[in-house]
Image (cartoon, rainbow, N blue to C red):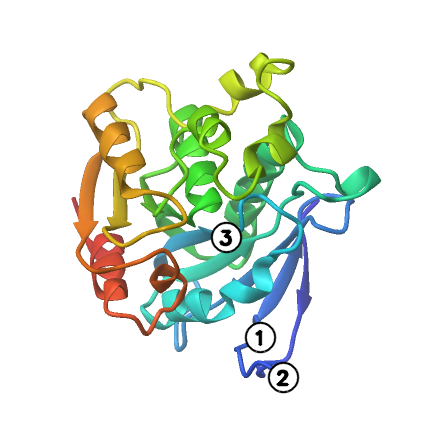
């Protein structure tokens, strides 16, 4: 059952980042947490977009949702209910170990819990939008290709090919840490592929990738868009990988416009 823990509206004393308005637990393990940021001056029963942000970090436990606070606050300031989900990642010990299928089940369960929480507040969800960066973009694409009830996926500098990530040794072995050696675990790589062909009415998918990205090459997204014609690719000139996690960067004007776009 989804539970909510009210938190003070404050900022982190060390980083200066805005703390969430509430935290949701969606499962029994410690990483089953969603940070909630609410727009100001919204009446109960209002119809609002739910924008769920999935952070990156090459699926590693060394990166967590705390780095996404300013992004999620920005989403709420734009008028949406902003949420950042945590999930089990590679490097986690015991019950917190990620990979296939654990991480993917976490994403599915977190999104369902996020929707229940909004409904529990008495609001109506206008659209459910997933925004993911890097490995989080991979998870957003994966969920959008396999589950209904997602209106839009916006993948920012995403990992689009887990096997290619392994073969090119991106992130210094990140894919193998996450899914194992594909020669030993081919099913994990097949199941973790971020996209499957979908019928009409599937999520609207936008990929935004910078030309100066030296963490996930823009060529990966270009090849992905050619392979999946329903995907719209936006190339951001002179943008690298980490501008996408800075909501004050110029590329966020494009991100917010894609979130707001009606069709």
Say which residue appears at 63% left-offset and 80% top-offset: 8
Q: Which residue is mark 1?
A: 19
Q: Is residue 185 visible?
A: yes
Q: Which residue is mark 3?
A: 55
Report the disc number at residue 14: 2
Q: Quadrant of residue 79?
A: bottom left
Sequence-first tag of 1 and 3: 1
- 232 and 28: which one is in front? 232
Horizontal arrangement in the rendering, residue 218 relative to residue 7 (left or right) = left
Q: Secondary structure at mark 2?
A: loop
- 90 and 17: which one is in front? 90
Q: CA distance from mark 2 to mark 3?
A: 20 Å
Give the percent coordinates (x, y) of residue 111. Answer: 52, 42
Q: Count all numbered tags in the image, as a single digit.
A: 3
Q: Quadrant of residue 28?
A: top right
Q: Secondary structure at mark 1?
A: loop
- Figure check: 46 above or below 184: below
- Figure check: 1 above or below 24: above
- Figure check: 40 above or below 36: below
Give the percent coordinates (x, y) of residue 40. Answer: 41, 76
Sequence-first tag of 2 and 3: 2
């Amino acid at each position: 059952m989804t539970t909510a823990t009210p938190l003070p509206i404050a900022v982190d004393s060390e980083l200066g980042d805005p703390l969430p308005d509430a935290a949701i637990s969606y499962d029994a393990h410690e990483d089953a947490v969603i940070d909630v940021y609410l727009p100001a001056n919204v009446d109960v029963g209002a119809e609002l977009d739910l924008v769920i942000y999935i952070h990156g970090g090459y699926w590693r436990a060394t990166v967590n949702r705390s780095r996404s606070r300013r992004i999620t606050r920005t989403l709420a300031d734009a008028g949406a209910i902003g949420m950042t989900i945590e999930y089990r990642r590679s490097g986690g010990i015991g019950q917190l170990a990620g990979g296939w299928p654990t991480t993917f089940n976490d994403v599915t369960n977190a999104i369902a819990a996020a929707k229940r929480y909004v409904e529990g507040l008495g609001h109506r969800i206008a659209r459910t939008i997933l925004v993911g960066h890097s490995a989080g973009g991979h998870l957003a694409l994966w969920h959008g290709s396999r589950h209904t009830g997602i209106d839009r996926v916006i993948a920012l500098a995403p990992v689009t090919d887990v096997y290619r990530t392994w073969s090119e040794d991106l992130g210094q072995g990140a894919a193998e840490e996450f899914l194992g050696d594909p020669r030993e675990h081919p099913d994990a790589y097949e199941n973790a592929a971020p996209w499957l062909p979908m019928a009409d009415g599937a999520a609207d998918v936008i990929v935004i990738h910078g030309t100066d990205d030296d963490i996930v090459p823009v060529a990966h997204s270009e090849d992905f868009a050619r392979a999946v014609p329903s995907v719209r690719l936006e190339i951001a000139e002179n943008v690298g990988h980490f501008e996408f996690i800075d909501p004050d960067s110029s590329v966020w004007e494009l991100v917010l416009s894609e979130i707001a776009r009606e069709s």
